[in-house]
Amino acid sequence: MTMATCGFDPDELLPPGAGSGDGASPGLVRHVTGCPECSRSLADREEVARELRRLPRLQAPAGAQSALRFEAVMERVDEARLDARLAAEEPAIRRLLRLLVRLRAPSALVPPVPDRRRSAVALRPARIVALAAAAALVAAVAIPSILAPAPGRSLAKQTAILSERTPIPVRVVRIDPRSADAAELRARIPMLPTPHGGGS
Amino acid sequence: MPTDPDFELIRRCQTESGPAREAAFAELFEAYKDRVFNLAGRLLSNPADAEDVSQEAFVTVFRKIHEFRFSSRFYTWLYRVVFNLCIDQRRKGTGGTPPPAGGGDGDALLASVKDSEPGPVQQVVDEDNRRRTVERALRRLSEPLRVVVVLRYMEDLAYEEIAEVLGISLGTVKSRLSRAHQFLQETFGSTGVPGGRRGAGRAGDGSVGDGGSGLDPPD
């Protein structure tokens, strides 16, 4: 440290603490009052101290993986507690890992084609059941359509089939709106609106 | 005997057992975990190491809390434990090397710093730049000087308390602080941070310290 020209010990030229109770000594105050060089130097140091005090504290990491959780500390203190937790969690972790491995490499773990023994013993009943179900489905769809009478080609015949063989009566009325008057129209077509705006 | 608001909790840790003891220790843990991590993080410049050392410090304190004799403040004892563990970590060869300015793991630690108060964009940018400059300058200090600065200006310890934590004399504390000031003033001077000594030329070199002697382990 460069000695000031006045000879004052620079190690004593330190800014007072913010909350530590270290106030400036009477000797320092007396000297700085009469020495512009040391006064300037002390002012610079106080500014540096202010900058340093403005720095925020580093924040302890939070979260389940942080080593700075109280539970993590206590598990280090009491290793039996840690062992118990690890033992309790192990089955679930193993299951997850197995699942993960399967998801990542299914062909390596699950044979895509079963071997002959498994095929003969385990899969034969399943195949028989599946074939029977498929055959029943086909029969259920095909038999009614084979047995049902073929529908007639005309519209009246098809309509008769749809309406349980009862034809729907249709009456066609031809009216010339230019020649017929309103009373006649209303008489022949009851759903026409009345002159008051309402329908019949 | 100094009065310390933590003494009651420590007494409970010493006299109680089971959940009551843990509850008292949990209060101490919550009160000091950020300070402990800050000190370890500033000394080790590596978040993972700082986390491990912080945890180890609390484990040590819990195991040895019956040895506390109430002759000093609790936090000076705690900081001393943290400091010793940081020395051990450094001796293992990890965590002690300051990262290069402007990069390295130190920036990961800086990322954990809470953002400053919001304001106009330029003001926030200037403030952020200034903070980074101060952070980098602090990281470039050698550990013996850095720890004194952190304990003094971030943890507000008195010179006597710093001497107690580090196991060094009061004169050494002041001398280190004085040298740290000189370096920081010169560094700030070349970057425009207030308090810097304009025109000083040493800011661009490597870390500054006491000739590479490293940390002085306490007794």
Image (cartoon, coloured by chain):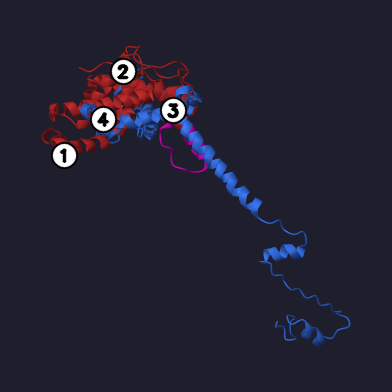
Q: Which residue is mark 3?
A: A121
Check the rendered structure and report the hue given to chain A: blue
Q: Secondary structure at mark 3?
A: helix
**Which picture quadrant has residue B132?**
top left
Compute the Cα span from label 3 to label 2.
63 Å
Identify the mark nearer the N-term, 4 or 3: 4
Please name which of the two marks, 3 or 1, marks the residue nearer to the observer. 3
Q: Is residue B171 magenta?
A: no
Q: Residue at x 19, y 38 (%)?
A: B24
Compute the Cα span from label 2 to label 1.
33 Å
Compute the Cα span from label 3 to label 1.
63 Å
Q: Which residue is mark 2?
A: B89
Q: Secondary structure at mark 2?
A: helix
Q: Which residues are magenta?
A: B109-129
Check the rendered structure and report the hue given to chain B: red
Compute the Cα span from label 4 to label 3.
56 Å
* Residue B213: mark in rendering: none
Q: Which residue is mark 1?
A: B20
Compute the Cα span from label 4 to label 2.
18 Å
**Which picture quadrant has residue A92?**
top left
Q: Which residue is mark 4?
A: A73
Q: Residue at x 31, y 13 (%)?
A: B91
For disc 2, the chain is: B
Q: Secondary structure at mark 1?
A: helix
Compute the Cα span from label 1 to label 4.
16 Å
For disc 4, the chain is: A
Please name which of the two marks, 4 or 3, marks the residue nearer to the observer. 3
**Which picture quadrant has residue A155?**
bottom right
Is residue B5 among what the camera can see?
A: no
